[in-house]
Image (cartoon, helix red, strand yellow):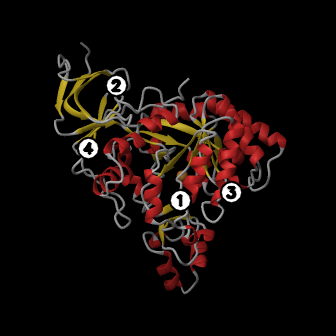
Amino acid sequence: MTAQAILLRGATVVDGSGAPRFLADVRIEGERIAAVAPQADARGAQVIDVAGRIVAPGFVDVHTHDDQIVLEAPVMLPKLSQGVTTVVVGNCGISLAPLVHPDPPPPLNLLGGPGNYVHTSMAAYAAAVTRARPAVNVAALVGHSTLRVATMDDPYRAATRAEQTRMVELLREGMDAGAAGLSSGVFYPTGAAADLDELALLAAVAGEAGGVYATHIRDEFDRVLDSLDEAFAAARRGGLPLVVSHHKCAGPRNWGRTVETLAHIDAARARQPIALDMYPYVAGSTVLDRDMVDGIIDVLVTWSTPHPEMVARSLADIAAEWGCTQQEACDRLQPGGACYFQMREDDVQRVLRHPATMIGSDGLPHDRHPHPRLWGTFPRVLGHYCRDLGLFPLEAAVHKMSGLSARRFGLADRGEIRAGAFADLVVFDAASVRDAATFEEPVAPSIGIDCVLVNGAIAYRAGRALPERAGRFVRRAA
Ligand code: ZN
Ligand code: CU
């Protein structure tokens, strides 16, 4: 008998593997699941009746920019309230470590205000996570743009051999400290000057250590196929699994083209391991970028340093009020961020349904008026897409949020419900679970998430985060 035993009684278990649900009790002892069985031993346990509720593995948010927020606001309510128990930080080439910089260029400013880049190494960042005791677990990618800004006086040009050697050293340190892999965002100016050789060189370092390569590809618009090919080649040469970040076909000219891109990805998957992540919305969100303002799609301002009064308004309105073009308005609002309504619903659904697609919010926790994906991603897939539209069975939805994700990112003993696994769990009501965050009112906890456990401790219950924060820095599996 252990002190901290909990028994979830009468659960409908969706175990994360994709297998059909079954009825069982789940007994937790300390930080792990001790038993999954009918009539499991209740002795010495706090018994929670979960009859009629789904018990699933805590969700893994594979695509986040939570590097700083886990330190700054470790309660992590936007994620906990969705049933998320692990976040993968460092996506899109942007990681807080390893970089010491007073005011790094966009898009590195997605991670909050200047002054956040103070971690000389991934080991130092991991130590900072441990000190902060966030409510959720943290796995980290090493960002390629971060490596470039750390090693180059000017990240907008090609790197020299010496600079690349220094990037390799920093990345190796990151992998030794337990990073899950390398990320890149060659779409962004800080990463764009890198060629395939540089990406393959670094991918190989992450690959040797057993990591993955996640990439925000060079072009999600007209040149999406070429950009996918570049990502395939970097991962193939690096000898490691690829994750295509937030897969989309952006811009009205490319709507409908996920038919092509998914076929292209499937053909490549015959030769190499490839997974995708995505968030369940037709709008993306990133820093303000005049190249993404085409005068056709809607653009919603999410933050602006010089014009905070324009936040939550559309760029078209602001331009009309100022009597200028949308591009000019974009320039005057800098630095800032926006939501871009650049996708079409049929593409979103097609990518969501793909068997290699995992769910990742890509939420931006420092934005004043954030994209609703920050608070709504996981319940939106469970409620809107799975239950209401019937896009896939609940078992498949959960798999895309847990088992598949944990395996892809090397999170040992997570993402599945079985004896011996970590007790990262979410209890929810399949009939009522839904997102509440909208583009108008983006800060809203989801409905129907009853209880969340992280490493065996109850982290969230009845709409409230509990004081015991039991998340930790999760090292890549050996
Ligand atoms: Zn990205
Ligand atoms: Cu991202």
Q: Let me know if residue 33 appears in the view.
A: yes
x and y, in percent, of residue 184 in the image: 64, 47
Contact between marks 2 and 3 (CB within 8 A): the answer is no
Q: Let me know if residue 96 appears in the view.
A: no
Q: Amino acid at mark 4?
A: Arg
Which residue is denoted by mark 4 in the rendering?
464
Depth order, front residue of 258/162: 258
Q: Residue at x 53, y 59 (%)?
A: 259
x and y, in percent, of residue 271 in the image: 64, 40
Q: Which secondary structure lies at badge 1?
A: helix
Which residue is denoted by mark 3 in the rendering?
226
Q: Nearer the viewer, mark 4 or mark 1?
A: 1
| Circle on res. 418 | 2
Q: Amino acid at mark 2?
A: Arg
Q: Quadrant of the C terminus?
A: top right
Q: Amino acid at mark 1?
A: Val
150 on left or right of 73: right
The 10 Å Cα crowd at callout 2, few under 14, some 14 to 19, many 20 or more, is many
| Circle on res. 259 | 1
Q: Residue at x 48, y 43 (%)?
A: 62
In the image, is the residue at mark 4 within 8 Å of ligand 2 by its beta carbon?
A: no
